[in-house]
């Protein structure tokens, strides 16, 4: 069972600082369009890259599905290319499939563009995926 303390540490506790994209939002969007042409994107701020603590069997299952043992949480959405999320909302991604250029976290459906500095943390699958909208 996931505890409130685990969720609190994940959202507000210390982590390893990661640079993300340090240029403009427009430059980041242009890079994403070149790297992932036609793929939906979501520009996020105050983000947390979450390395999921998984056992060897879980890691093998994810790998077999082409997924990373990682997800992304962002406290603030700046822009969603498909209008699925409104600015200033929060978002938690599905499992990642790639992490490119240190600023683009790709899932099967979306590329999350990491604007500015963020954090890298570890968490259980239960803690990371306990955050749901609605």
Image (tube, rainbow, N blue to C red):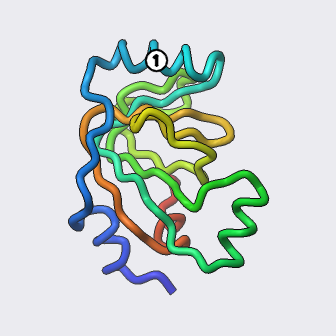
Determine which residue is flagged by label 1: 31
Of 49 and 6, the residue lying toward us: 49
User: How many numbered marks are there?
Assistant: 1
State the image quarter where residue 54 is shown.
bottom right
Q: Does 39 appear above or below 116?
A: above
Q: Does 96 appear above or below 111?
A: below
> What x and y, as percent, mark residue 94?
59, 51
Of 2 and 15, the residue lying toward us: 15
State the image quarter where residue 126 is shown.
bottom right
> What x and y, as percent, mark residue 56?
65, 78
Is label 1 in a helix, a strand or a loop? helix
Question: As drawn, is 94 to the left or to the right of 133?
Answer: right
Mark 1 Cα within 10 Å, few/some/many (few <14, many 20+)?
some
| Residue displayed at 43% across by 32% down | 113
Question: As drawn, is 102 to the left or to the right of 20?
Answer: right
| Residue displayed at 75% across by 67% down | 61
| Residue displayed at 60% across by 54% down | 95
Which residue is situated farthest in the bottom direction here? 1
Question: As drawn, is 129 to the left or to the right of 23?
Answer: right
Q: Does 61 appear above or below 112?
A: below
> What x and y, as percent, mark residue 109?
66, 36
> What x and y, as percent, mark residue 49?
40, 53
| Residue displayed at 40% across by 38% down | 102
Q: Does 42 appear above or below 54?
A: above
């Amino acid at each position: 069972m996931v505890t409130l303390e685990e969720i609190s540490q994940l959202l507000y506790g210390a982590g390893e600082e990661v640079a993300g994209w340090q240029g403009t939002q427009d430059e980041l969007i242009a890079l994403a369009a070149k790297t992932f042409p036609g793929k939906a994107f979501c520009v996020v701020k105050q983000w947390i890259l979450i390395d999921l603590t998984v056992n060897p069997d879980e890691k093998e299952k994810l790998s077999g599905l082409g997924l990373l043992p990682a997800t992304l949480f962002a406290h603030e959405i700046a822009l969603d290319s498909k209008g699925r999320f409104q600015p200033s909302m929060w978002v938690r991604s599905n499992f990642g499939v790639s992490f490119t250029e240190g600023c683009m976290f790709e899932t099967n459906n979306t590329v999350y563009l990491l604007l500015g500095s963020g954090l890298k943390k570890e968490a259980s699958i239960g803690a990371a995926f306990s955050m749901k909208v609605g």
